[in-house]
Image: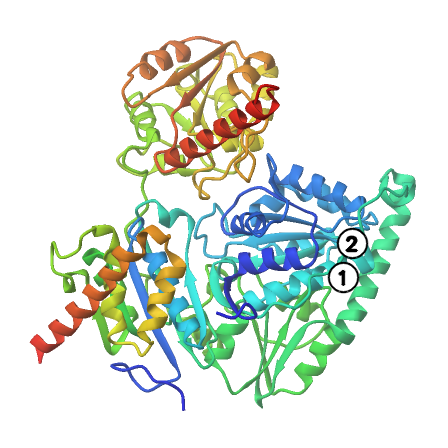
Amino acid sequence: MQRLPRGVSMKKVTNVVIAGLGGQGVLKASDILADAAFRAGFDVKKSELHGMSQRGGSVSSDVRYGDEVQSPMVPAGEADVLLVLDATQTEINRGLLRAGGVLIEPDVIEEGALKNRKSLNVALLGALSTVLDLPEEQWVAAIHANLAPKLHKINEQAFALGRRSAAARREHAA
Amino acid sequence: MSADRQLLNGDEAVALAALHAGVRLGTGYPGTPSTEILEAFDQLGGHAQWSPNEKVAMEVAIGAAFAGARTLVTMKHVGLNVAADPLFTATYTDVVGGLVVVSADDPGMASSQNEQDNRHYARAAAAPMLEPIDSQQAYDYTLLAFEIAERWKIPVILRLTTRVCHSKTVVRPREAPVETPPPHFERDIPGRVMIPAYAKPAHHKLRRKLAEIAAWNEAEGPRRLYDGDGTLGILATGIAAVHAREVAPDARLLVIGMTYPLPLATIREFAAGVDRLVVIEEGDPVLEDALRAAGIPAEGKPEMYRFGELNVARVRRILAGDTTPEPAPPRGKPPELCQGCSHRDVFEVLRDMHCIVAGDIGCYTLGVLPPFSAMDTCVCMGASIGVGLGLRHVLPDDEARRVVSVIGDSTFVHSGITGVAEMVYNPPKTGHVVLILDNGTTAMTGQQEHPGTGRTLHHDPTGKISFEGLAKAMGVQNVHLVEHVDTDSSLEPLLRELLAKPETSLVVVRQPCVLAAPKIRFYEKAAAEKMMKQACSACPAG
């Protein structure tokens, strides 16, 4: 039996779109997510656009994982989760989200709670990890594999903060 | 993580395959989406070099392959235009070492000035072409390309597209790297000296090679057939194949790996077994036209889908024959020149002076956007100088005196030097002014080195071209250097002075890219330390 994501619908491929602005670590975040899913044994495809987008413009990256993934791009209206690193990028990407899909925005992390704003991407991955069924140890391994050793501790802390913040928000909402 | 399963993008997969194929030299010029291939090859321990431009990269690669070495040359789609001259005759020669040419196309123009479809080059240059659909195939087809290239002594084009280059997918590499024989020189005058006496028979030989390759492709070429019900058959290539598979999992799908020369008999047989055959291809209707010429009945895509990338939604529409207007894609925040970038200061001056700016390809092309709106033309690498001169030659004098050519450092080395030769040789009567915006790196593609930085692809010190010295030696009348353009306001008065003179002028505006500056300092420090160590070890007292 395939491991099915928690909080998203029962289907074979899980679709996540990560969006933000150039320089925010959108691509790094999608690398970590793709790596965590890869380490968990899934077929994974991750797509992104380089080049012009790096100069402060809108950047987005698609990650799809499951038994077998075909297109590397998440079709409009089929994203299970839209994770946005900059609130200005929510509206332009909202159409990617499926009905009932989960939107994660930067305000899930309390202002000032992060030691370094640069690790917002990883903190939001922490929040994302609470709606995807990928084992925590694979997330941590992926963070280690994709970041320089001197950044491991602060990003592990950011990831844990994101997990706590998302859980607290859900409790509050319930 | 087991090493037999890796998550790689298409570029990294090509680099890994190059290593496993025993490639002795990788050459190229940076260009999105191809740049990471040589960088990854270098990181894996391969010998990779940036050339000044794609033509030189191709020529160096041809030379290495003539010596029997497996050689990889990489570039973006428009780079193949620059390298087309050597390619079109290299196919006539007997290239004994495997020569594989990577053309990374950019349908949808994520970071390019056009969306030309380089499948046309395979037919025009008579070079076999392989098109992978994902990183696994990028890996497999790189290995296969070397086998084909060596078997028929012909350059093979590996055509990638942005979504293949920049999508990470799972790759299972082969176990053992290939052992290749050491290079050596063997004289073969009729096979390599393309004077008419040898080129005429060589052309016939090339056509014989292609006929053999077509037969091989027919018999055992790379392809995938997904069985399905015969009411709908889809013929697809490249990334379009995975979109098609997702949209129509029940259709019978034939994915062709070698798209030139095509296995037409295989396609004909496939077509005969389905009620309806639809060709799903990104870009120009290359495959569709080939089928039509062969008399194989098939549907192509409506003209509106020639433009931009394909995706799942668009393939669904093509299969449904839907030509209603597509929803407009969301408009994101456009890119801009970085805060603190010295190009900003230059374009403010050009804007305020109402210059007519012949621009070029690089980060500084963003000078066209507000708040600068200070660029009037951008065509191709190096065009700023020629286009600026052309404007100068025919415009009335008062307008001609406002024309400035603006070109980056890497682009200048790529193809600006011949423009300066033109300026010296055919100076407009009002003179001309060329600005080299030297930020010490190939910034746009991700900060690659070039012959003006004095460092190799691997960031080790090497020979360095002086732009000022070059311009003086070529006979440019006024050569100036402006540094610290952010704090020093000398650029504007200097430009006023030069624009008023009926003379040829070249101004180097030199300030490191703000993103690259820390790395440049690091490389310089490492080089200084290395030199110090060498000096100490050479000292008898040491």
- Which residue is most to the front? B541
The numbered mark at residue B148 is 1
How far apart marks 1 and 2 lie (CA) works out to 8 Å
> Residue at 23% of width from left, 60% of height from top?
A158
> Dot 2, how many residues are within 10 Å of its Cα: few (below 14), some (14-19), or many (20+)?
many
Count all numbered tags in the image, as a single digit: 2
Q: Position of residue B336 (x, y in %)?
A: 31, 41
Vertically, is B297 above or below B307?
below
Q: Residue under circle 2?
A: B154
Circles 1 and 2: CB atoms closer than 8 Å = yes
Does A46 appear above or below B349?
A: below
Callout 2: SS: loop
Residue B386 visible in the shown view: no
Q: In the rendered view, would you say A78 is above or below B435?
A: below
The picture places residue A103, in percent across and down from the top left corner, at 22, 70
Residue at 67% x, 71% y is B291
Local packing at callout 1 (Cα closer than 10 Å; few below 14, some 14-19, many 20+) is many
What is the quadrant of residue B259 in the picture? Answer: bottom right
Going by the numbered disc 1, the residue's amino acid type is Ile
From the viewer's side, name the closer residue of B342 and A75: B342
